[in-house]
Amino acid sequence: MPLAHRLYDSALVLAPSGRLDHDNCEAFREELAPFLERSAKERLAIVLDLAGLEYVSSAGLRCFMLAAKQAKAQNSRIVIAAMQPVVSEIFQIARFNLVFDAFPKVRDALAALSPAAAAAFDRG
Amino acid sequence: MRVRFWGTRGSIPVALTSADIRDKVAEALYRAQGRSFASVGEAYDYAVAHLDFSLTHTFGGHSPCVEIENGGDEYFVCDMGSGARPFGAHVLARQSGRPASVNVFMSHVHWDHIMGFPFFGPAYAAGTRIRIHGCHDTLEHAFRLQQAPPCFPVEFSQLAAQIEFVKLAPGRSHEVSGVQVTPAPQMHSGDSYGYRFEHGGKSFVYTTDSEHKLENRAQTDRFVRFFHGADVVVFDAMYSLADAISVKADWGHSSNIIGVELCQMARVKHLVLFHHEPAYDDATIESVLRETRRFEELTRGARALQISAAYDGLELDV
């Protein structure tokens, strides 16, 4: 799964796409790992931009849970943005809406994390 | 086969309170605004057709006890939770004085799964034959211990029935009075075992108090093989997925989401959510059922999976 990323001031926006399930969740974790390390070193928050994620299984949700735990342990934070309706429903049914703060758009998530990150996003 | 649920709640029995019943009645009356009923039967029909299950019923209260009827003379039952008390009354009424032969299959010996046995009427009837099957070395010890002083007034040795303990080997198929029974090891504190019953071309799987680790692909594949093609799977869906893999990880239970995914992979026909969380009220369990059906719709492949939530009194034809 290609993990596109962009930095907006103190926030990293990561954008997984396609399907996240039993077959590719470990590859996704490996791709995510350096960004989690970087967020700890550089004190960056992470926004998972899920606009391109079509489906997530329980194994994929576990990857998000592990990432959230690691972020919490390193005093960082992960939030979710721009979920497609199907993924949003799955989050709710699995009660992951109680684990993550979720925002309709990436800019909303950045604004909640830091005004500077939102301003950087607005500058493009 | 026919499956009859005598106890469906996990961990500890739960009773409706007077306030719960008052609230259900008040809500039902409110929803019936403007209607009048010429008879109780008419009101009954309205309630069944128009009101939520959680308003007109309760998922219930007793801890695990599930009967499998195969058309023969002998009884088959999984676990002896508090549902064993009404199950015992059913056996005695049906036998009308004739001695019963009861085959019990124990998932494990935690308290909620054995607590009904001291109240299981047939155990006090001379001539009853009870064979308690399981894979734990501690099976007999646990049954005797809960009736030892000072925990209970009648010691196990005073029971009038002829009681045998039968050790089963996990992973092997055993023939028990014409039914093929295969136990499978499960992840739970002190271990637990699921059972697959096969009779007359039908298959039924009872799998409770079982945690599934998503990172363990070999375990997932083993359960897919164990469930494969089953007509009905009764599944421990006690927690939400988020709880099951975070704050309640290693507590030995599973979730509705994992139940659906395993049953879809195993091409199961009917998933029954079981071992309900004692903190959940009827409306919450009904909401979990609705959401689980929706999750199945969102993830459905070539064939649909039927989904139910077990309740005390539910009967299913397999």
Image: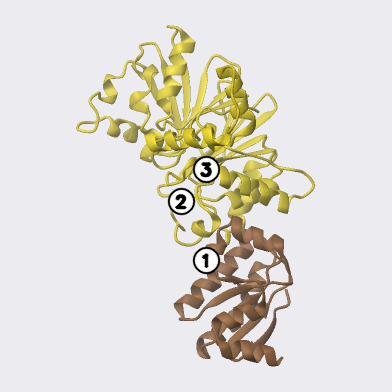
Chain colours: A brown, B yellow
Residue B199 spot, x, y in % from top left: 64, 25
Question: Is the residue B208 above or below the residue A62 in the image?
Answer: above
Chain ID at mark 2: B
The disc label shown at residue B252, or none: 2
Q: Residue at x 65, y 63 (%)?
A: A88
Q: Amino acid at mark 3?
A: Ala
Q: Amino acid at mark 1?
A: Val
Q: Are marks 3 and 2 in contact (CB under 8 Å)?
A: no
Chain ID at mark 1: A
**Does any portion of residue B224 appear in the rendered image?**
no
* Residue wearing tag 1: A99
Q: Secondary structure at mark 1?
A: loop
Disc 3 crowd rating (10 Å Cα; few below 14, some 14-19, many 20+) is some
Is residue B134 toward the left or the right of residue A109 in the image? Answer: left
Question: Is the residue A90 above or below the residue B178 in the image?
Answer: below
Disc 2 crowd rating (10 Å Cα; few below 14, some 14-19, many 20+) is many
Q: Residue at x 59, y 21 (%)?
A: B37
Chain ID at mark 3: B
